[in-house]
Image (spheres, grey):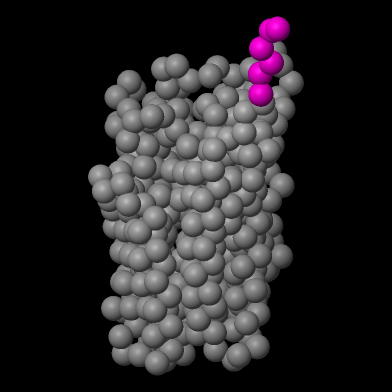
């Protein structure tokens, strides 16, 4: 494949496979609580276990990509996604289901780092925000598909069928990457003869940290919606299947908001204003959920859309921060921060729901996360605008 837009379409499809697998737990959360006898905190932990490996695996996966090439590492990640899905499908206890989530989560980290690098390689300096926006839309699309399809599957068959389906989807991604993907022209070749190392400047690490915290908190807002709103709807009298389908409104509008955010930023040049307005709208929408239960579906549509708008804008800033030779380790560093936040925040929100006695407490906590995301994006832009100090040169006398 030599057309960069066709390559992007391929990468979007492949990335949606692990989004589908990640969303499987949220899609069948009422069934898991009933069959495994777990509380909200344990459910939040099961969600975050998929992301937990990213804390320690993101940097090594970036270095592995520099050494062996992004295609080989992406294929290895897809193999782990398949194995983890099969482990969860065969599990009859919470511990075994959790182990399968961890294995699959390791694979998703490999895949996520490499797919993001692939997009940066193919679109460096050309419509990066738009390309990144379309690429990131694969996350909510995969989750939305899981929310719509997997609850009926669990009701008609079993949880084993649900997790087996995630492994099958991973297999389609593996075949696609192995058969179709080729590196971008001009991309740095794998440094097989060298020992891979972290080649990041202090300024790059600082700015990537700020952007990553913003991205992580923004993403956690969305995770809180899909994980805890279905439980709130069941509490209000909806069936588990109906609750999952209503909650799927958020991923669908999120999928619309992600590409629009990047496209608007590219065409208007007002990325900061878009992020600020989106964060305010999301915070207000979440704050209204506890007092406007009848409007939950409409509020989910608004909050899903608003929380999506900043995603591609924040992510595309990384291309401005990182030098081409620092992309793989830099993205690994970014995802270490990102996965750290997403591993910690869902269990914290789940514990908040247990303490308050209602899953709406976790949803309300997401409003705070969205406000923090907006503040850290602003901090990133301020730091990026500061001139880089250059060492003085000495003129010959």
Task: Kindly identify the residue that appears in the image at 43 percent across and 83 percent down.
Answer: 287
Is 130 positioned to the left or the right of 105 in the image?
A: left
Answer above or below: position of 185 versus 305.
Answer: above
- 215, 79: nearer the viewer: 215
Image x and y of residue 228, in percent: 50, 77
- 32, 313: nearer the viewer: 313
- Tell me if I can see residue 25 in this picture: no
Task: Kindly identify the residue that appears in the image at 29 percent across and 32 percent down.
Answer: 5
* Residue at the limit of the structure toward the front, as seen here: 397
Quadrant that contains the C terminus: top right
Q: Main secondary structure of the magenta part?
A: loop
- 83, 236: nearer the viewer: 236
Task: Kindly identify the residue that appears in the image at 39 percent across and 71 percent down.
Answer: 280
Image x and y of residue 192, in percent: 66, 16
Image x and y of residue 351, in percent: 65, 80
Does the magenta portion include 26? no
Image x and y of residue 104, in percent: 60, 50
Answer above or below: position of 59 versus 139.
Answer: above
- Tell me if I can see residue 382 in this picture: yes
Does the magenta portion include 394? yes
The boundaries of the magenta stretch are 392-397
Image quarter of residue 331: top right
Answer above or below: position of 158 versus 103.
Answer: below
Image quarter of residue 199: top right
Answer above or below: position of 198 versus 81.
Answer: above
């Amino acid at each position: 494949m030599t057309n960069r837009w066709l390559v992007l379409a391929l990468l979007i499809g492949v990335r949606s496979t692990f989004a589908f697998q990640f969303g499987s737990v949220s899609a069948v959360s009422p069934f898991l609580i009933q069959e495994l006898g777990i509380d909200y905190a344990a459910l939040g932990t099961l969600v975050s276990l998929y992301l937990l490996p990213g804390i320690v695996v993101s940097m090594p996966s970036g270095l592995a990509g520099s050494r062996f090439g992004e295609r080989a590492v992406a294929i290895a990640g897809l193999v782990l996604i398949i194995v983890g899905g099969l482990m969860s499908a065969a599990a009859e206890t919470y511990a075994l289901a959790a182990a399968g989530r961890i294995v699959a989560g390791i694979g998703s980290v490999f895949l996520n780092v490499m797919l993001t690098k692939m997009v940066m390689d193919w679109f460096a300096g050309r419509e990066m925000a738009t390309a990144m926006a379309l690429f990131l839309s694969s996350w909510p699309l995969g989750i939305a598909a899981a929310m719509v399809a997997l609850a009926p599957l669990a009701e008609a068959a079993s949880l084993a069928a649900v997790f087996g389906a995630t492994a099958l989807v991973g297999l389609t991604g593996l075949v696609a990457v192995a058969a179709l993907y080729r590196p971008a022209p001009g991309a740095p070749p794998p440094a097989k003869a060298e020992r891979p190392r972290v080649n990041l400047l202090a300024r790059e690490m600082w700015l990537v940290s700020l952007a990553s915290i913003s991205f992580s908190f923004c993403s956690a807002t969305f995770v809180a919606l899909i994980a805890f709103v279905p439980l709130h709807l069941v509490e209000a009298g909806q069936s588990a299947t109906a609750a999952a389908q209503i909650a799927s409104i958020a991923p669908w509008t999120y999928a619309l908001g992600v590409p629009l955010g990047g496209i608007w930023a590219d065409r208007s040049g007002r990325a900061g204003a878009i992020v600020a307005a989106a964060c305010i709208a999301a915070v207000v929408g979440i704050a209204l959920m506890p007092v406007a239960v009848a409007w939950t579906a409409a509020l989910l549509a608004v909050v899903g859309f608003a929380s999506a708008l900043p995603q591609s804008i924040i992510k595309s800033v990384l291309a401005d921060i990182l030098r081409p030779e620092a992309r793989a380790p830099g993205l690994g560093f970014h995802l270490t921060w990102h996965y750290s936040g997403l591993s910690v925040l869902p269990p914290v929100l789940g514990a908040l729901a247990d303490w308050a006695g209602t899953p709406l407490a976790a949803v309300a906590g997401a409003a705070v996360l969205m406000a923090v995301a907006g503040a850290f994006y602003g901090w990133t832009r301020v730091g990026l605008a500061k001139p880089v100090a250059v060492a003085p040169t000495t003129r010959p006398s």
